[in-house]
Amino acid sequence: ESVTKHYATPLLQGLAFNFKKQTEWHSYAGKTINLEKQAYFFGQPASPRTVITGKDCVDILGVKFKPLGISKLIGINMECLADNFIAAEDIWGPELESLCDEIQSAPSLENTIMVLETFLINHSRTSLPYRIGDTENALSLVAHTKGSISIKELQYQTNTARKTLERA
């Protein structure tokens, strides 16, 4: 048994935590994405979507970002996130598990929000401005060429060294 909800295209980018780790399916633009991880960044949807969850639904905590907010936090161009999802563990690794444990252990909603805000603020301070620009430019070129650009050409087009691209 499942629950199906139809959503109009919201104007937002965000971060969603699925604490029960229940499977969610998002169908839009002719594709279906299966979300099974604990947290995801999601970009601006470009079309309406249908979300299907288990009958018990999903225990979700969401963060809505201002335009370019995610980019400033994780250094990825929003163009690359449009109609897409990125697992938060791919960005934060094992820190995500600790964050989720701390959020779920918080004694109140206010404490939960404080834990999450502190984590996000601390991580936004570690994002260097040059990284964002380099990453945005490189990812835009990769997206524009549908992944067919060579590393040498990417270095030339973004005026960066290979190590800079690896660090970004």
Image (cartoon, rainbow, N blue to C red):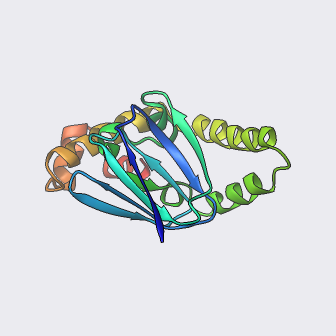
**Residue 77 in sight in this render:** no
| Residue 108 picture location, percent across and down | 83, 44
| Residue 5 picture location, percent across and down | 42, 51
Along the viewing direction, whichever of 68 and 124 lies nearer the viewer: 68
| Residue 8 picture location, percent across and down | 35, 39
Along the viewing direction, whichever of 151 and 94 lies nearer the viewer: 94
| Residue 77 picture location, percent across and down | 35, 39
Furthest-right residue in this view = 107
Position of 114 relative to 91 (above/below): above
**Number of marks in the image?**
0
**Residue 50 in sight in this render:** yes
Question: At 47% across and 66% down in the image, what residue appears?
Answer: 2
Position of residue 40 in the picture relative to residue 123 (left or right)? left
Position of residue 67 in the picture relative to residue 96 (left or right)? left
Which of the 4 image quarters holds residue 58? bottom right
Position of residue 106 in the picture relative to residue 45 (left or right)? right
Which of the 4 image quarters holds residue 80? top left
Question: At 25% across and 38% down in the image, what residue appears?
Answer: 158
Along the viewing direction, whichever of 99 and 160 lies nearer the viewer: 99
Which of the 4 image quarters holds residue 44? top left
Question: At 34% across and 62% down in the image, what residue appears?
Answer: 33
Position of residue 105 in the picture relative to residue 152 (left or right)? right
Furthest-top residue in this view = 66
Question: At 43% across and 38% down in the image, what residue appears?
Answer: 131
